[in-house]
Each structure stands twice: as structure tokens, then as C-alpha cells.
Image (cartoon, grey):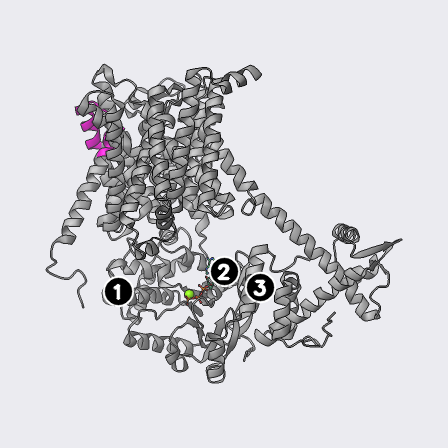
Amino acid sequence: MNDLIIIVTGSLVAICCGILGCFLILRKMAMVSDAISHAVLPGIVIAFMLGSDLDSIWMLVGAGLVGVFTTFLIEFFHRQGKLQTDASIGVTFTWLFAIGVIMVSYYAGDAHIDQDCVLYGEIAYVPIDPIITDSGSVLGPKALIVLSIVLLVILAVILPFYKEFFLTSFDPAYAAAIGISATIWHYLLMSLVSITTVASFESVGAILVVAFLIVPPATAYLITTRLHHMIGLSCVFGILAAILGYYIAYWIDGSIAGAMATVAGLNFGFVFGWTQIKKARPVTSPPISQD
Amino acid sequence: MIEQVQNPALEIHDLTVSYDKKPVLWGIDLSVPKGAIAGIVGPNGAGKSTLIKSVMGLVPLSSGYVKIFDEELNTVRKRVSYVPQRESVDWDFPASVLDVVMMGRYSKVGLMRRLRKADLEAARYALQQVGMEKFEKRQISQLSGGQQQRVFLARALTQQADIYFMDEPFAGVDAATEKAIIQLLKEMASQGKTVIVVHHDLQSVATYFDWIIMLNLRLVASGPTEKAFSQELLEETYGGKLTLLTEVGELMKKGQYPTREKQ
Amino acid sequence: MKEVFIEFFGMQNPNVRYVVLGSVLLSISSAIVGCFTFLKKKALVGDVVSHAVLPGICLSFIVTGTKDPFMLIIGAFITGWLSILVMDYIVQNSKIKEDTATGLALSVFFGIGILLLTVIQHSGNAAQSGLDSFLFGKAAALIGKDLLAFGLIAIVILATVFLFYKEFKLICFDPDYAEAIGVPVKKMEMLLTSITVMAVVTGIQAVGVVLMAAMLITPAAAARFWSDRLSFMLVLASIFAALSGVSGAFISYTTPSMPTGPWIVMVLSLIAVFSFFFAPGKGIIIKLLKRRKIQMQLLEENLLKSFYKIGEITEDFKAARSNAELKEVRRFSSGQFREGLNRLAKQGFIKRNNGTWSLTAEGLQKGRRVVRLHRLWELYLTKYLRIAPDHVHEDAETIEHVITPELEARLEKLLEYPDEDPHSSNIPYN
Ligand SMILES: Nc1ncnc2c1ncn2[C@@H]1O[C@H](COP(=O)(O)OP(=O)(O)OP(=O)(O)O)[C@@H](O)[C@H]1O
Ligand SMILES: [Mg+2]
């Protein structure tokens, strides 16, 4: 039973991240997601101090705001300070993360977050942390429920506005010209990424959220030609990584999240290698037929 | 030679556009009649793309205004179409030719709505018009540069707009296709649509366009091709560098002077 | 407080000495390397490497079975390097873009590292404890041996930069040119990458995986606001880094619960933010001040111009004018109006006679110049830009304040010292 819960949790993270990650890498914002995943730390600590729980809705809302704030700060340094984007990302997230760590040290003892958890989470604890209603009945593991809600939110945003996300990712100038403002969709996406990060935080940790956000979509990107295929395939790769990762971790007694990221990486390696071989082999029929 | 027309499709009034306070277009004043195929010519860096972007509201104006069919851009947006320079997007994007062409229908369909059968038909028809119907399923990275350009053109056509702005639509397109497309544009113009095209090939200007806009930081000419397209004005557009103007521009950037004083 | 200060900076306590010297050495060597990666627009490479050393450390431990720092560092060095190679290979051989490759290498290497680390930890091997200091850093627990390592590496880095300064500079600013004049670009880049990895591998023990990126990027970014020159940038970045190294050590010395690494980064970031606002030239506040100065210039010149214009009508330039008369020529907000007149009076361009104002000789000359520039520019616009005479006024309103005496002379010559502007107003010369 616990196996199943962990695998399902991992898969939920994989699906949330797989969907969002596709848009992120197509918008060339992969590293912004990395920045957000670190920068939410002070937000989480503040929410903690204000007495909310790590899984509460307020935490998610707060995380959304912090994510947007991070994005905004990165753009502010970039635009106003004429700082190149990569440096702007680096300066911003390390600063916010340092603030977060300092806060954690300051409130050490009160807060049940430590650096380990921030960095690589502990998905193995998911089953032992159930939500219990006032009447006393067990609803199920917290992380599982929160992640399901997050997934629903993501679907509720992406599905109806799929074509807007599609267009603004591909050609923001044309989108603006026909009256679809890229800015709104940009910030909406960033808030979704932050919410996902926080929801996945406890189970897989900041850096492995990034692995799920970037690696399966990048793998799918190599071998697909339509966006919706890419999204679907990256979810599949993500779930694959979650399942295999779990068993590998179980087998060699290591971090589950670490194993999931490793599998995702191996998966990328295979697909990448395969595309390389295909490319190297002499082509019998030209890829672009002249019709 | 700057000719203004009554009841124009496009009117640009006293337009100055700056990047970081340095003007790259100075005091542009022009109008283009309805039903014209207008060419914008000028050397690299003359501000042709900037002119189109400012008309489309993609860069802020330092002064002046733009009117399309005597209205603000926002009120007539649905009647306006735009073909950006091909290099402005990443062609590795996982999208098929049809996906891209369908984007032209997004503003018609509206938020949260799905594309309808009619939109698909319109997209297919536009692909036919540019001779790309056989490629509709192909991924856009597997097209040649000229074919990509045609996809962009088809996307604009599906919008069924009344005025089209095209930034170098013929870059990388072979001569035969270029002729076919110009024929198409002429047909559209005869139906009263207005087409404004950034163009680099001076040889074909006289045959393609009935209106010509010559640009180089400032407007050198805007008028009917037979009147405005003269050797003298061409030399002025391509030869005459206004060093004084450039230097003043640099000074404005250095001192961050406002382009217009607020009263 | 004072005692603590003396105690700390007296450095009698060897522990304090180690921590301070270690932090400073580490900060400086990272900052110097960081300047180059920053200028190569590869700032985030440091982030990748710092995540990628973890598997190397673990593998090295698994293979050798000891925590010999030397062995660990070699392992770290190898996987750090590997991550960069992998990243470059992916970008060059597929459609994947640089940012994605960066995030990919970073998270996968780190994932593998975490997996190995937890496997080691769960294996019950007692020797493993302390390996995770590579994750979070242990600046406050630096000992003599660490210091030796930092010192050595700092020297190697500094010497390398010193020896190959010219080459590094070239490959940052213009690799094509460097190639053309026979600089071995590939080799130089490998060298630069090697010292980057080296700086990361050592630095990570002090500040941890995540914050290592800041040690490379932030000093460079801060220094960039102050200078365009590489040499100056390197010096400044080192100073900033040293300063934050000392402050970080000091803060965690006075408040032992406070971690050194994050405080170093905190101070660094504050320096960067300060530079962002206050650095001369590029700082935001400085820009605002400059804008205000320009506004004042515009205001003063517009007032003088008003005096001159009234003078033109009445053919008497130096007569006293009332506020009402001046405001008739041009609208000013009343606050600005008063401020501008007072400033002009103070600068000696106008005289105050009870309730009215009159131009001095200098004021007259200046007012006349503004009017002249305005009309010359209008003429220039109509003649050379073919702008209709009824559209040139607005533009000239700005440019009259921008033109320098040198440009003025050229403008006059170009237009052949004209007498009249497009509206047939007289162009006044001295
Ligand atoms: N985003 C920008 N920021 C700063 N300067 C810019 C920007 N875009 C364009 N410029 C500058 O503005 C000027 C006009 O550029 P623009 O792209 O409009 O030229 P163009 O006429 O379209 O040239 P081409 O024929 O090469 O397409 C150039 O000097 C260019 O350097
Ligand atoms: Mg252009």
C-alpha cells in the first residue's frame, strides 16, 4: 500500500511538472524554474511563522506570489539594471535562498524544515502524514491530496487556455499583434510553477522538482513534433521515472527522489543516444521528401 | 516627395521611436491609401522593422500616433494582420504547419473557445493559396526557409484582415513563389485590402508596388511608385548618411533626454 | 560589542583565523573566476558544476573508502568537468537550447549525487559522516588543513589568471578575433573551465551546493555596475568578495547559530543591490538624479527662452518682466516656475528687481542661443528630413537643449548660416 502511495505521489509530481515543463523549456525559461524552486524557501518559512501548515492552501497561494515576485525581480534586474539574464537569475535566487536558510537557522527548533528536506525532500514519509478531518476520518496522505488539487488547478488553467499558451510560447510578438498579451500568460505560468514547486517540496525537494520540470520534457522534445504529443510523452517519461526510481531506491536503499531523477536522466541519455545513432546512420530515404 | 492622401488606410503622424532614448525613427509623417500595395525600402538598420512594430503596438512610441482606418489600433485589431521577420521565432518548436497557420484564427475564435471546422477550412485554404497544402502535417523545423516564410504568410491570410503588415515576406523565397505570392497580394488589393511590405530587392519595386515608402532613420519619400521611386531619392535613402542626426541621437541616449517634454 | 570586535579582528583565536582567512581566500578566488564566466555569459555554469561535484565526491568515497580530502576533490573535479562536457555536447548535437541543457545537467547530476550519498549514509559505514558538509558547507568549522587547501587553490587560480590575463580577456570579449590572431581558444577555454571547477570544488565546502553560484556570479554582477574595464572589475569583485567573507565570518562568530555561508551570500547580495541602485553611471538612483538635473536644465533654458521671446516682440531684451508676462509665453507649473527663476537668479542669468525679473548679459546670450538652436533645428528638419514646417516645433523643443557647441557650429555651417527658420522667424546670432 505504501509503495503505491509513494509511486502515485511521484507520478503526480511528474505529471504536474511534465505539463508545465514543456512550456518552460519552449519559452527558454528552464533556469527560471530552477530559480523559483529555490526562491520559494523564504516564502515557506514566512508562511510557517505565520502559523500555516506546509500543505495548507495559504502556503500554495503564498508560493504563487513568491514565484511571481521572483520572476519579477529577475526581470527587474535585467531590464532596469541591464544585467544579463543568466546573471540576473543567479543573483536573485541565491539571495532569496540565503535569506531562507538564514531564517531557517534563526527559527531552528520551531520550524520543521531543515536544509536536507529543502534540497532533496523525503517522499518516503508521504504515507505516514495523513490528513485527518475534524470528524476523525482519515482522508489520505496529505501530499497526495495537495498534489491532486494542484494538478486539477493546472489542468483547469492549461486546458481552456491551451491555444493562448501555445501561441505566446511560439511567437509572442504575433500574439501581441493580434491582441493576446504575452505578459499575463507568462506570469500565470510562473505562478503555476511556484505552486507545483511548493506542493512537491516536501516529497521530492527543490532540486528534484527541477529534474521533473526539465528532464522529461527535454526528453520528449527530442522525439516529438507536436506540442500536445510532447506534453503527453513527458508525462509518460516522468511517471516511468517515478516508478522505476522507486524500485531502484528500494533495491539499493537510497533516496527515492534521487533515484527518480537518476532514472529520468538515464532515460534522457537513452533517447538522446538513440537520436544520435539515427542521425549518424546513412539515411536511405531523405527526411524531407520532395513532393 | 511625401504625399498625403485623404481617407487613408494607414496614417502615421509625427512618429518618433526610440530605443533607450535614442531615436531610430525621426518624425515620420505619412499616409497610405486603401487598396494599395505599399513597399517599404531602406538599408539595413534603417528602421523598417521598427516602423512596422510601432504600428502594431509592439514598441512604445516616443511621440506621435498611428491610426488604422482612422481608428486606434486596439479598436480595429481584428482587421489587422502581421507577418513578423522569420528569424523572430524558434522554428524547432514542436508544431505542425497547420498548427501555425491556425494561429491566424485565434483572435477570431476568442478566449477559451476551441477552433472550429470552419477555422480548419480557412487554414487549409490559405495553405493552398501559398502552395503549401501538401505540407500541412509537416513539423515546421523540417521546412526550408522559403517554405517557413510561406507558412507565416498563410497564417496572416487566414486572419482575413483588411490591412496586412509584412516584414520581409520574400526573404529566402524563390523567384517563382515570390511572383505567385505577389499575384495573390495584388488580387487582395483589388478587393480593397491594403498590404504593406518591407522589401529589399530594388529591381522589383516598380512592378510589385503601387506605393513606395523610403526610409532611413527619417522618411525620405512616401508616394505613388511612379512619382516617388526616383534615382535621386534612392540615392538619398541609401547614400546620404545624416551624421548630425545620428550624433544628436547618441547625445540623447547619453543624457537620457526625454523625447518630448511634458508640459 | 566592542570586546567581540577586538576579539574577532585581533584574530588571537586560531579558529577565527582559519574561518576568516578561509572565507576570504575562497570568496576572492571564486569572485575572480566568476568575472570571466560572467563576461562569457555563462554565469550559471558555476551552478551546474556545484551540483555536479556531489556524485564525484560520493564515487570517490565509495572507491577509496576514505574521506581523504584530496581524493574527494579529485572525484569532484572529474564529475564537475564532466557535467560541462555533457552540457556542451547536448547543445551542440541536438535542438535542445542552452538553458534546458543547463537545468538538465544540474538536476540529473545532483539526483545521482543524492542517490549515492543516501546509499552511503544508509550503508552504515561510520567513516561517511561529514560527507554532507559538501551539500551545505561548513564555513564555521574550517580547520587548518582546509585553509591550506584553499590557500593552494587560490594561488593556483590567481597565478593562472595572472599568466593568461590577456588570453582570457580576449576569449571573453571576442573569441573569433582571438582565434584569428592565433590564441589557442579551445585550450584557453579548457583552462578557464578547469579553474572554474577548481574554485567551485573548494568553495562548495564552505557555502554549500546552492549558494556556490552566488560566490561566482554576485561579485562579478556587482562589480559590473561600477566599471566597464575588466581589470578594475576584477579588483572590485575581489574587494566585495573579501568584505563579505569577513562579514559572514564575523556574523556567525558573534551569533553562533547563524551560518557563515548564507551570510556571506547575503552580504554579497546586499552589495550587489546597493551597486544596482547607487553605482555611478549605471545605478538607478544616479540615473534618477541625472534625469532631475536634465529637467532643471530644460526648465532654466525654457525660462530664458521666454525672456528672449518677449524681448523679440518688444525689441527690448533687458527690460524687467513680471511673472504674468513670462507665464504668457509658455506655461510652467507654479512650483517649477519659482524654483527655476530662483536658480537662474542665483546663477547670475537674471536679476531680481522687486517683483520683476530682468535678463543679465549672460542670460541674454544663453536665451538667444536656445532660440537659435531651436530655429536652426527646425530648419534642419524641414530641409534634411522633409518634415512639414508645421510639425517641426515639438521636436526642436527637445533638441534645442541637447545640441553641443561643437554640433551647433556644424549645424550652422551645414545650413550656411541661415537668417530665417521655416516659419520666417529671424535666427539670432551673437
Ligand atoms: N530592441 C532594440 N534595442 C535597441 N536597438 C534596437 C532594437 N531593435 C532595433 N534596434 C536598432 O534600431 C535600428 C533600426 O532597426 P530595425 O530592425 O528597425 O532595422 P531594419 O530597417 O528592419 O533593418 P533590416 O533591414 O536589417 O531588417 C537599428 O539601428 C537597430 O540597431
Ligand atoms: Mg528588419
Question: Is label 2 or label 3 in front?
Answer: 3
Mark 2 C-beta to ligand 1 under 8 Å: no
The foreground one among C311 and C14 is C14
Letter of the chain that mark 1 sits on in the rendering: B
| Residue C221, quarter of the rendered image | top left
Marks 2 and 3 sit apart, C-alpha to C-alpha, by 26 Å
**Residue placed at 44% from the left, 23% from the top?**
C20
Q: Quadrant of the image for the C terminus of chain C?
A: bottom right
Answer left or right for C246 relative to B127: right
Amino acid type, residue under disc 2 in the picture: Gly
Q: Which residue is mark 3?
A: B248
Q: Which residues are magenta?
A: A243-262
On screen, residue C358 versus residue C104, left or right, reads right
**Picture quarter with ligand 1:** bottom left
Crowding at dot 1, Cα within 10 Å, few <14 / some 14-19 / many 20+, comes out as: few
Residue B87: quarter of image: bottom left
Chain letter for the residue marked with disc 3 in the picture? B
Task: State the mark number for residue B57.
Answer: 2
Of callouts 2 and 1, the N-terminal one: 2
Residue B223 position (above or below residue A129): below
**Tag of residue A47:** none
Residue behind mark 1: B144
Mark pair 3, 1: CA separation: 42 Å
Residue A27 showing in the rendered view: no
User: Considering the image in quadrants, where does the N terminus of chain C appear?
Assistant: top right
**Subunit ID for the residue under disc 2:** B
Image position, residue B81 (x, y; %): 42, 65
Magenta highlight: main SS:
helix
Residue B12, horizontal then vertical, whole percent: 54, 69
Q: Which of the two labelled residues, at mark 2 and mark 3, occupies the earlier sequence position?
A: 2
